[in-house]
Amino acid sequence: SLCEGDDVNRKLVVFVPREALDNVRTALFDAGAGRIGEYEHCSWYAAGTGTYLGGERSSPTIGERGKEQRVSELRLETVYPEERHDEVVAALRAAHPYEEPAFDIYPLL
């Protein structure tokens, strides 16, 4: 396992528009994510399409409320130690351009 012997025990998966990738990665790395052993800035990403329909009180970054959007996005994955959880999530929310960024956090066994 890549994480064996390290303090890395959580994985973050977040969906970002391509133009926001570098800003989000930098914020996450600055908050303590992406370190495995002697390596830093560890992440993985792949392209896909995100969809959403903003409600009446939404303020979509891309598109308009009441109209379904299809956006080219990247699925970004990185790891972080549990003790950095609050900092990593706060950095993600601050750096991500979306009003409600979609992300998942997985415990690593």
Image (cartoon, rainbow, N blue to C red):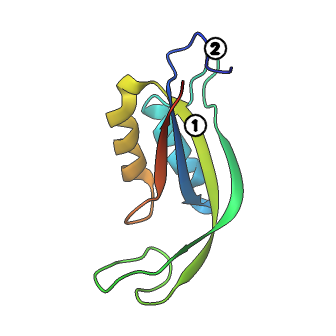
Q: Whole-percent x and y of residue 101?
A: 44, 59
Q: Secondary structure at mark 2?
A: loop
Residue depicted at 71% across the width and 53% down the height: 46
In the figure, residue 37 lies in which quadrant?
top right
Q: Nearer the viewer, mark 2 or mark 1?
A: 1
Query: Where residue 16 appears, x then y in whole percent?
Result: 56, 58
Look at 46% across and 33% down and name the residue there: 30
> Would you place residue 3 above or below residue 64 in this image?
above
Image x and y of residue 44, in percent: 68, 41
Residue 9, above or below 76:
above
Of marks 2 and 1, which one's residue comes earlier in the chain? 2
Amino acid type for the residue under numbered disc 2: Glu
Neighbour class for label 2 at 10 Å: few (<14), some, many (≥20)?
A: few
Where 61 sits versus 84, above or below? below
Q: Say what secondary structure mark 1 lies in.
A: strand
Do the residues bearing badges 2 and 1 touch, measured as CB atoms within 8 Å?
A: no
- Is 87 positioned to the left or the right of 63 in the image? left
Q: Nearer the viewer, residue 23 or 93?
A: 93
- Image quarter where the N terminus lies is top right
Cα gap from disc 2 to disc 1, whole angstroms: 15 Å
Residue 88 at x, y = what percent?
40, 37
Question: Most extreme residue toward the left, as rendered?
Answer: 57
For badge 1, the amino acid type reads Thr
Left/right placement of residue 38 relative to residue 69 reads right
Dividing the picture into quarters, in which one does residue 20 lie? bottom right
Q: Which residue is mark 1?
A: 78
Q: Which mark is residue 38?
A: 2
- Image point 41% across, 76% down: which residue? 60
